[in-house]
Image (cartoon, rainbow, N blue to C red):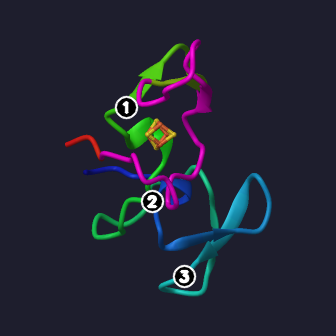
Amino acid sequence: MKNLIYKDTRNYSPIDVTKGVDLLTGKIVMADNVAPENYELRPKCKFCQNYKEENEFNGECEASMSDPKFFAYGDMDSVTCGMYKQIN
Ligand code: SF4
């Protein structure tokens, strides 16, 4: 996947909502700046096949067994979700 922004990679650790540390260079970077091409995608709901987007920031999880299906944020970290299926 190309053109990932820092906050969508595993190679970034946030300091606050706008900036964080590039874990490969140790430099402070802006969260929304484009990361180098080889940086690894961080699993998030917005990158999951089960995520049904409702607007720019949120949607619902189609893998949910609840009725109605549970609410999900696109930026929600999915590292520990056992139902995560990465989009291509
Ligand atoms: S399966 Fe997990 S990662 Fe995928 S949308 Fe649902 S909660 Fe998010």
Residue 84 spot, x, y in % from top left: 38, 47
Q: Residue at x 62, y 56 (%)?
A: 31
Instruction: Check if residue 9 falls in the magenta segment.
Output: no
Q: State the residue lying farthest toward the right.
A: 16
Residue at which label 1 appears: 50
Observer-side mark, 3 or 1, equals 1
Residue at which label 3 appears: 23
Pointer 2 or 1: first along the chain: 2
Residue 67 spot, x, y in % from top left: 57, 14
Q: Is mark 1 within 8 Å of ligand 1?
A: yes
Instruction: Check if residue 65 falls in the magenta segment.
Output: yes
Q: Residue at x 51, y 86 (%)?
A: 25
Residue 30 spot, x, y in % from top left: 64, 59
- Do the CB atoms of the residues marked 2 and 3 lie less than 8 Å apart? no
Vertical relation: 59 (above or below) 72? above
Three-letter amino acid code at the position of disc 2: Arg
Three-letter amino acid code at the position of disc 1: Asn
Q: Dot 3: few (<14), some (14–19), or many (≥20) neighbours within 10 Å?
A: few
Residue at which label 2 appears: 42
Pointer 3 or 1: first along the chain: 3
